[in-house]
Image (cartoon, helix red, strand yellow):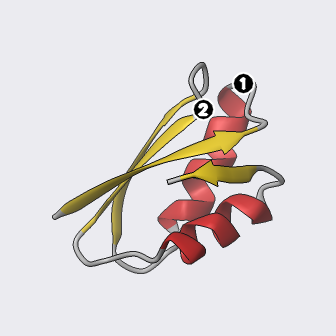
Amino acid sequence: MSSTEYTVRGMTCGHCAGSVTAEITKIPGVTGVQVDVATGRVSVESDQPISADAVAEAVDETGYEVVSA
């Protein structure tokens, strides 16, 4: 089990968090996603290594941007 933290720019509400969570959850191997809108932190738990590019692409699909991992 692995957990990686990302900072995402642009999230402002629960709907934002839900969109980001839903999209990241589609990545194979992801077992959990925790979003803190106030800080912009997104924690991704997985049962296998997940590439930062895959997470960035998923976040981009929702209209937000990963600014650091």
At 73% from the left edge and 34% from the top edge, which residue is drawn? Answer: 11
Residue 10 percent across, percent down from the top left? 78, 36
Residue reaching furthest to the top? 38
Name the residue carrying label 2. 40
**Residue 44: percent from left, percent from top:** 39, 54
At 78% from the left edge and 65% from the top edge, which residue is drawn?
A: 61
Spatial CA distance of label 2 from label 1 is 10 Å
Determine the secondary structure under disc 1.
loop
Q: Which mark is residue 43?
A: none
Q: Amino acid at mark 2?
A: Gly
> Which residue is painted at 58% across and 56% down in the image?
22
Q: What residue is at 46 percent from the left and 77 percent from the top?
A: 51
Residue 21 relative to residue 51: left or right = right
Query: Tag 1: residue type?
Result: Cys
Work out whether mark 2 precedes mark 1 in sequence or the reverse, and give the earlier one: 1
Name above or below for residue 42 compared with residue 59: above
Front residue of this view, candidates 14 and 54:
54
Number of callouts: 2
Find residue 59 and report its horizontal and vertical position in percent: 68, 59
- Residue 15 sits in quarter: top right
Looking at the image, is 4 positioned above or below residue 47? above
From the viewer's perspective, tell me whether residue 66 is left or right of residue 48.
right
Query: In terms of secondary structure, where does tag 2 sit?
Result: loop
- In the picture of the structure, the residue carrying the numbered disc 1 is 13
- Residue 46 left/right relative to 25: left
- Which image quarter is the N terminus in? bottom left
Q: Nearer the viewer, residue 41 or 12?
A: 41
